[in-house]
Amino acid sequence: MLGLFKNSLDNKQKIIIFYMDSNNQVTERYVRVLEIKENSILAYCFYRKQVRTFNIENILSAGKVRKKVVS
């Protein structure tokens, strides 16, 4: 997962994360990583439209955003 965060940071790419918030609710977030810290990432959250800090231990999964194919 750390490699995905580094790729997002280096290439300014949007990724999707599934994150468990402080109320134990799982949320789906589209983010762009701005900084990688020891236990967290600083990222622009497209859902909240602001820079947020995400604890790495609360990120359940992460992946590249797939582009929609229009037929």
Image: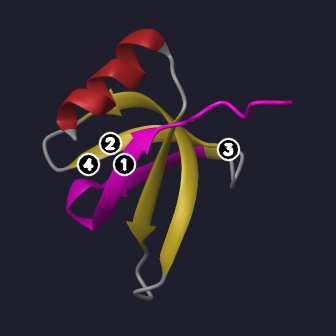
Residue 23 is covered by the magenta coloring: no
- Dot 2, crowdedness within 10 Å: few (<14), some or many (≥20)? some
Toward which corner of the image does residue 31 lie, by quadrant?
top right
Q: Which residue is mark 3?
A: 46
Give the residue displayed 50% in from the left and 16% down from the top: 12
23 left or right of 48 in image: left
**Helix, strand or loop status at disc 1:** strand
Residue 13 location in percent, x, y? 51, 22
- Dot 4, crowdedness within 10 Å: few (<14), some or many (≥20)? some
3 left or right of 9 in image: left
Mark 2–mark 3 distance (CA, rounded to whole Å)? 15 Å
- Dot 3, crowdedness within 10 Å: few (<14), some or many (≥20)? some
Quadrant in the picture for the C terminus: top right
Work out which residue is located at the far top of the displayed protein and give it. 11
Q: Are marks 3 and 1 in contact (CB under 8 Å)?
A: no
Work out which residue is located at the far front of the displayed protein and give it. 71
**Helix, strand or loop status at disc 4:** strand
Residue 3 location in percent, x, y? 21, 28
Q: Amino acid at mark 2?
A: Ile
Q: Which residue is mark 2?
A: 41
Query: From which residue to which does the magenta span run?
Result: 51-71
Q: Earlier in the sequence, mark 1 or mark 4?
A: 4
Residue 65 is covered by the magenta coloring: yes
